[in-house]
Image: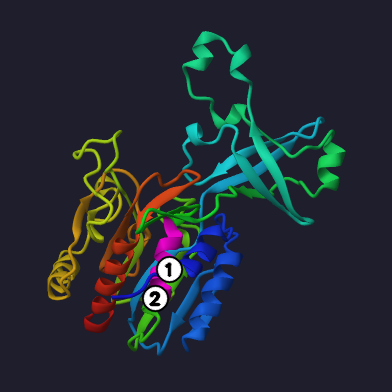
Amino acid sequence: MTVMDYELMARLSEADGVSSQEGEVAGIMVAEFKKRGLKTEVDNFGNVLAYKTLGRNPLILAAHMDEIGLMVKHIDEKGFLRFIKIGGIDDRTLANQQIILRTPLGLVNGVIGMKPPHIMKDEERKSVVGHGSLFIDIGAGSDKEARLMGAEIGCVATFPTKFCRLGKKMMCGKALDNRIGCYVLLELSKGLPDNVVLMGTSQEEVSTFGKGAMTASYRLEPRAFIAVDTSVAGDHPELKPDDAPLALGKGPCIALVEAGARGNVADRKLAQNLLRLAKKAKVKVQIEVFDGGATDASSVHNIKGGIPSIAVGIATRYIHSTVGVAHEDDIRMSIKLLGEIAREL
C-alpha cells in the first residue's frame, strides 16, 4: 500500500489558499503533476486540471484547493483591522488566535483581539463573541502605519498552524479540509489511466456549492464526477454516533446524501459501483448521510442535463477551524479505492 509522504502533506497543509487566492496551492499541484508526466492547465477560474490524455466525457476526480480564512473590510484610525469571514468559520475558534496577513508588501503577523474577560459583564462571558466584535491587531499605532506595513482593504488572513504528526498514524494541521483531497489526487497521478482528469478546484468554501468545480465541469461534460473531500468525524467526546457516525481509521466515506438532500443525492448506479469496487479492492468504507455541508459534487450533479456525481470523503476531526486531525490509513485506503475507480470507470 502507498507509503504516506508526510513532507508533501505538510507543504500542502501549510500553503495559503483562501478562496479565490489559491495560487500557492495551485503552484504545488502543477509542479507535482508535471513531475509525474501529466499534461496540466490552469483555467480562467483558477482550477488546476491534470491528465494523461483528454477525450470526450472524461471521468473527473476533484479536490478543492481553497481554505477558510478572513478578509480585511476596514482599518480604523488606531490601526486595528475589522474583517469578514471567508467560508464557514465558527466564531468560537477565532478569539485571540494568531494570524498571517497577506499584503502587497509581504506577510504581516497579527493577533485577533477582543475585550478581555476581566471587564465583561456576566452575560457577555456566557455568550460567544461574534466575529463582528473582534479585530486584528498587527502592532500598528495608526491607520497610516497599518497601511505603510501593507494592510489594505481586501487583504486576506490565514492561521499559522504548523503541520505535525500525532502518535504513530495520525496528523494535524491547517486546511486539512481539503489539502488531504489534494494529496490524494497527487498520489493518484502516478499511473493515471487515459481520459481521467484530476482537478484541483477553486472557491468551494464560499458558496452553498463549489464554484470552480461547476465552471470546469460545464466545459468538460464529464461522464461522472467524484469529489474527493473531507467528512465530519464524530469519534470524540462531544458527539454522539447519531450526530456524526464517522470515525478515523475506519476507511473512506461514501456520501449518499449531502446537505440533507438540498445538495447532492448520489447517483445510485455510481454509488453501487463504488461499493462494488471497494469490496473488490478489499477497502473497508463508511457510509455517510449528511444533513450539514456539501462538497463539489453538489455543484456538478445538475449541470448540462445532469452529471452522475458522488463524494468520497476522508473523516477529519475539527474541520472549519484553525486545525484538523486525520488518520493516514483513511488517506491510503482512499487512494487505493479511487485508483480502482479510475481504472474501471
Residue visible at 48% across and 54% down?
Answer: 175
The residue indicated by pointer 2 is 187
**Neighbour tally class for label 1: few under 14, some 14-19, many 20 plus, Cα within 10 Å:** many
Residue visible at 53% across and 25% down?
Answer: 129
Q: Position of residue 230 (x, y in %)?
A: 36, 56
Spatial CA distance of label 1 from label 2 is: 6 Å
- The answer to whether residue 91 is magenta is no
Q: Is residue 150 visible?
A: yes
The amino acid beneath tag 2 is Glu
- The answer to whether residue 183 is magenta is yes
Q: From the viewer's perspective, is 109 left or right of 323?
A: right
Tags 1 and 2 in contact by the CB under 8 Å rule?
A: yes
* Quadrant in the rendering for residue 300: bottom left
For label 2, the SS is: helix
- Residue 183 badge: 1
- Residue 233 badge: none
The amino acid beneath tag 1 is Tyr
* Above or below: residue 70 compared with residue 192: above
Residue visible at 57% across and 61% down?
Answer: 15
Query: Which residue is most to the top?
Result: 122
Q: From the viewer's perspective, is 60 left or right of 68?
A: left
Residue visible at 47% across and 47% down?
Answer: 323
Q: Position of residue 35 (x, y in %)?
A: 51, 85
* Above or below: residue 138 compared with residue 178: above
Query: Which residue is most to the front?
Result: 168
Q: Is residue 301 visible?
A: no
Q: Which residues are magenta?
A: 177-186
In the image, 105 versus 99, the foreground residue is: 99
In the image, 101 versus 324, the foreground residue is: 324
